[in-house]
């Protein structure tokens, strides 16, 4: 601090908020949202993160903590000034960090909020559901002053904003610099309708509702005395018998930055080769980054109560929705985040944790089908990635999986197999974009005529895991759109579906097939008589050897297809197919070509595809209809 600064504090330098922030602030300032309590939860959570980060940096650089080792968060209401101050002695921010962190929308949760906001008419109801971090303070304050000093730095800076278009940054004056020796002090100038947050009992209420399990002491300063208002204990270290569902719920919401209820809670201590405490949760709703390409997990690693990272890959990607904490007694405190990548102890923990989570999901499925159903609805699409990625767990995951089928919802493979039709030996499935559309796919017709249940798989991941041959309980899973199917030994339940072809007009199968094949040329790998159709004239299937039809479509949309062509199967009893034969006999080449293309393209449409050339498709249909009408 130089003399010039003291005598004449440098004028604040003005900065504009990033456009998204300005938008967010407009919403905060004009918010009529009544659950304003969330602002305190957000600021305390930031303060706690800052203490965690300092403690982590201090492992390598203990000097950072020597002067003031007791990390804490301090809340000071000042009725005369109308301010509430939230101060921590954590990591702090330097000038650039103040500009970057409090001027842009950094975190993914807030981004997701912005996306939702664009869709929603009334954004305010979304605030509580997301918690929009630091900016939520503008719900209760019309002016905010943040004074911060990065740990170890000789300078402190002040950030001020009234929530308009921008903020000011200046060097802290002597008094402020003396007050904030390390960490961050946030002074909220409360709006008139938020003055209740000056009342100690209100502050206690909010802290105990939302922030009781913050690991660092939260002190409430009243006059010259201060009082710890949270339990500040590592909940995962406490015995289960002491804890109530509300405790777990709050811990979940604190640890996961979540706002829903946990659908499953797993709390135990591992002892043996390694000792560690585990507190894991399955959320009940999907977080917004669930399908983020990074597929990163969110379980936090602590070592002897010190937060290390949430980047330690303690869960496989297909369990990335699991939240919580693993607190190791054995890992060295100074383990770097990089070293964790190849650490055998971490690998052993991951394996054991994965097994435990699966076991817990299995027993939840048995004990409380409804709770399990919630988890499966939200995360089944992610868990199924494990069938594909984790050979060792494939059987367990197939057993856990729930499927929509032609006969019911949330069916297990065990139930499916128990309801096998006489002589049925395979588990049938069909993959597509939507379960509803799959229900009307012609490939189901022959199965339906026999009352055979078919799994309707409509998650994007289904195209992947079904690529690999798998079986359940010794029964192979078999795609109805790949290779040949033979229901021959399974009796019909519905005789009328299998009408015998009328003799009149029946044409030689081989001739028709050859004619269609010639007409379609390169567009198909082959043309065959179908045994899976009853009412529809045609469908497309993949060869048994190549990739599935659905995966090939997915990949060719990204220009990564193998170039494998589909096989067109024809229902030899269908009038349209017989018409090909008739046209062939009459040497009417135009009709043969148009009919063949029509059969192919309508099969594409029934699979949810668009014909390669929609205009040609329409022209062809019109031509055929016009000819049929004699026009
Ligand atoms: N008390 C604080 N100490 C240090 N850094 C902070 C503090 N409060 C906020 N920050 C910084 O501002 C960023 C934005 O905070 P916030 O909007 O709550 O989002 P999030 O906490 O999810 O990152 C934080 O990531 C952090 O870098
Ligand atoms: Mg935050």
Image (cartoon, grey):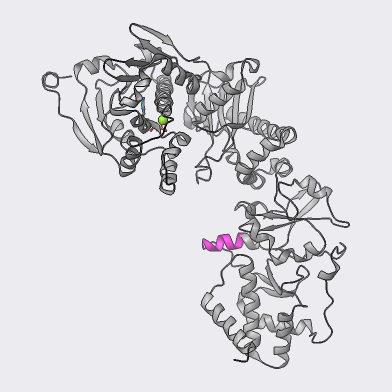
Q: Based on the displayed image, in which of its 4 quarters is residue 319 positioned?
A: top right
Residue at the top extreme?
A: 224
Q: Based on the displayed image, in which of its 4 quarters is residue 629 positioned?
A: bottom right
Q: Nearer the viewer, residue 480 or 392?
A: 480
Q: Residue at x 85, y 62 (%)?
A: 493
In the image, residue 506 lies at what x, y percent?
Answer: 80, 84
Queried whether the magenta region covers residue 555, the answer comes back as: yes
| Residue 547 appears in the figure | no
Check the picture and name the quadrant holding the N terminus: top left
Task: Left or right? Give the position of 97 relative to 358.
Answer: left
Queried whether the magenta region covers residue 394, the answer comes back as: no
Q: Nearer the viewer, residue 559 or 167?
A: 167
In the image, residue 234 lies at what x, y percent?
Answer: 53, 18
| Residue 590 appears in the figure | yes
Q: Which residues are magenta?
A: 551-562
Q: Residue at x 50, y 26 (%)?
A: 254
Q: Residue at x 29, y 31 (%)?
A: 98
Check the picture and name the quadrant holding the C terminus: bottom right
């Amino acid at each position: 601090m130089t003399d010039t600064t003291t005598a004449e504090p440098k004028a604040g330098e003005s900065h504009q908020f990033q456009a998204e922030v300005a938008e967010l602030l407009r919403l905060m300032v004009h918010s009529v949202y009544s659950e304003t309590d969330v602002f305190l939860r957000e600021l305390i959570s930031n303060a706690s993160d800052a203490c965690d980060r300092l403690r982590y940096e201090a492992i390598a650089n203990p000097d950072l903590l020597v002067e003031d080792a007791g990390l804490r968060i301090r809340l000071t209401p000042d009725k005369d000034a109308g301010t509430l101050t939230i101060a921590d002695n954590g990591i702090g921010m330097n000038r650039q960090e103040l500009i970057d962190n409090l001027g842009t929308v950094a975190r993914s949760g807030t981004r997701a909020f912005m996306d939702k906001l664009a869709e929603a008419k009334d954004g305010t109801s979304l605030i509580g559901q997301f918690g929009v971090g630091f900016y939520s303070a503008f719900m209760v304050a019309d002016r905010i002053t943040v004074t911060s000093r990065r740990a170890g730095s000789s300078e402190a800076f002040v950030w001020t904003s009234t929530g308009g278009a921008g903020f000011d940054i200046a060097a802290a004056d002597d008094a402020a610099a003396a007050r904030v020796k390390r960490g961050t002090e946030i002074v909220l100038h409360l709006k008139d309708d938020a003055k209740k947050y000056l009342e100690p009992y209100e502050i206690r209420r909010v802290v105990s509702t939302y922030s009781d399990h913050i690991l660092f002491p939260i002190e409430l300063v009243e006059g010259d005395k201060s009082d710890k208002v949270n339990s500040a204990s590592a909940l995962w270290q406490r015995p289960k018998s002491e804890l109530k569902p509300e405790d777990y719920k709050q811990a979940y919401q604190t640890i996961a930055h979540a706002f829903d209820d946990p659908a499953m809670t797993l709390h135990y201590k591992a002892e043996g080769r390694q000792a560690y405490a585990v507190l894991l949760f399955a959320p009940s709703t999907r977080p917004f980054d669930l399908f983020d390409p990074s597929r990163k997990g969110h379980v936090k690693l602590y070592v002897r109560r010190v937060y290390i990272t949430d980047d330690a890959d303690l869960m496989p990607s297909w369990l990335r929705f699991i939240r919580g904490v693993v607190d190791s007694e054995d890992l060295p405190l100074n383990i770097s985040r990089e070293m964790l990548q190849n650490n055998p102890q971490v690998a052993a923990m991951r394996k054991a944790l994965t097994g435990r989570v699966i076991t817990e999901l299995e027993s939840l499925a048995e004990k409380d089908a409804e709770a399990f159903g919630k988890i499966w609805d939200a995360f089944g699409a992610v868990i199924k990635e494990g069938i594909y990625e984790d050979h060792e767990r494939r059987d367990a995951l197939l057993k856990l999986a729930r499927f929509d089928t032609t006969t019911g919802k949330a069916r297990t493979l065990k139930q499916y197999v128990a309801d096998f039709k006489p002589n049925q030996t395979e588990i049938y499935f069909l993959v597509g974009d939507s379960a509803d559309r799959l229900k009307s796919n012609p490939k189901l017709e022959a199965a339906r005529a026999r009352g055979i249940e078919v799994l309707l798989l409509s998650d994007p991941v289904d195209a992947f895991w079904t690529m690999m041959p798998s079986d359940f309980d010794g029964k192979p899973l078999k795609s109805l759109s790949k290779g040949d199917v033979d229901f021959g030994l399974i009796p019909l339940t519905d005789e009328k579906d299998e009408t015998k072809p009328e003799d009149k007009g029946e044409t030689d199968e081989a001739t028709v097939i050859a004619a269609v094949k010639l007409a379609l040329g390169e567009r198909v790998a082959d043309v065959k008589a179908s045994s899976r159709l009853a009412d529809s004239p045609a469908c497309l299937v993949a060869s048994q050897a190549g990739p599935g039809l659905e995966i090939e479509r997915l990949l060719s949309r990204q220009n990564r297809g193998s170039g494998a062509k589909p096989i067109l199967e024809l229902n030899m009893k269908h009038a349209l197919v017989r018409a090909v034969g008739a046209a062939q006999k009459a040497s009417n080449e135009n009709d043969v070509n148009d009919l063949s293309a029509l059969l192919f393209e309508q099969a594409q449409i029934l699979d949810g595809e668009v014909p390669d050339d929609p205009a040609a498709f329409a022209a062809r249909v019109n031509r055929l209809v016009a000819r049929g009408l004699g026009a």
